[in-house]
Image: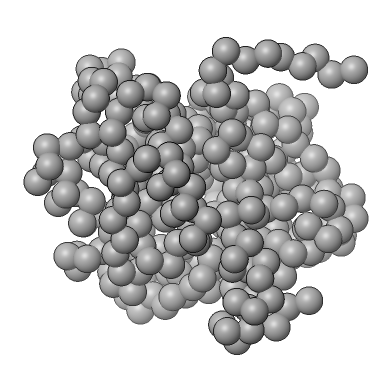
Amino acid sequence: MKNLAVYNNILDMVGNTPIIQLSRLNTGQSQLFLKLENQNPGGSIKDRTGLNMIVQAEKRGTIHPGQLIVEATAGNTGLGLALACRMKGYRLLLVIPDKMSAEKINHLNAMGVETVITRSDVGKGHPEYYQDMAARIAKEKGGYYINQFENPDNPATHVLTTGPEIWKQMEHKVDAVVVGVGSAGTLTGLTTFFKKVSPQTEFVLADPKGSILADYVNRKILRKDAGSWFVEGIGEDYIPALADFDLVRSAYEVTDAESFSAARLLLREEGILAGSSTGTLLSAALRYCQEQSCPKRVITLACDSGNKYLSKMFNNEWLKEKGMSIG
């Protein structure tokens, strides 16, 4: 019988998530493992990031109880921050692009978070771009802009926790890691860790079609013509300041339809309810595994829970409205 701990605080439950081997999907000669970050108390890997950025700011004396924290987020970092701020006594204001799911917004509002919704069809430098708006609001209101996109405590989270967990759980046998990039905290934290313990481990980027990052990795081209995509939380129209692509050997461009199809396949075949970015990572991971000529041990992430997307990619009517027909 498993040792079931009794926790004193919800924040003590962040991290130490399980890994499952996917046994019912076509992985070719390789083994594909999924780290269930959707099992964090706030439902995503960003619980780790939100908590660590707050804890480190406290240690430096940058913030004090009752202070206003401001952040720009596509959703999950906001939920991770909301959990930490609520437990630790900080006020939180989040600037959110309008493509974010209703479930995430309702979750934040129910936790008492102030939200400002802005446009998702504008790029960096535009006054309504969510990061620029968050920085401006923080300055106007005297809040602390935590800025996951340039905050070194973001990748440090995964050096301290996620990386060591994967290494131990996988018994020091990791041939490839498939990740996505939003702020690039997960990628950079994991590559920093693996450079020390297993520099031969290959990193593979899963990128939504429309993002510029796959072309940057595969062709060394920095495009200026980013498109749009429905997948939330990953993909960018610029190179994030935190990004470290040193161990990234290849990238796969994944359409929205492929992402949503993979997420729904994961639910039907493996019983795992995961979000839209997980579908992107899984689609790329399956392609990578199937292309290998020798067996490899590959791991990717269930970045968040699919219950955040029940009104979107798990809703057949929504898919039809967006011109996608997915089984």
- Residue 312: quadrant of the picture: bottom right
* Residue sitting at x 90%, y 55%: 24
Name the outermost residue toward the left. 140
Does 64 sit left or right of 322 as displayed? Answer: left
| Residue 274 x, y percent position in the rendering | 67, 53
Q: Nearer the viewer, residue 89 or 58?
A: 89
| Residue 226 x, y percent position in the rendering | 38, 75
**Quadrant location of the N terminus in the rendered image:** top right
* Residue sitting at x 83%, y 43%: 21
* Residue sitting at x 47%, y 52%: 106
| Residue 157 x, y percent position in the rendering | 47, 30
Does 326 sit left or right of 108 as displayed? Answer: right
| Residue 91 x, y percent position in the rendering | 28, 33
- Residue 286: quadrant of the picture: bottom right
Mark count:
0
* Residue sitting at x 30%, y 19%: 58
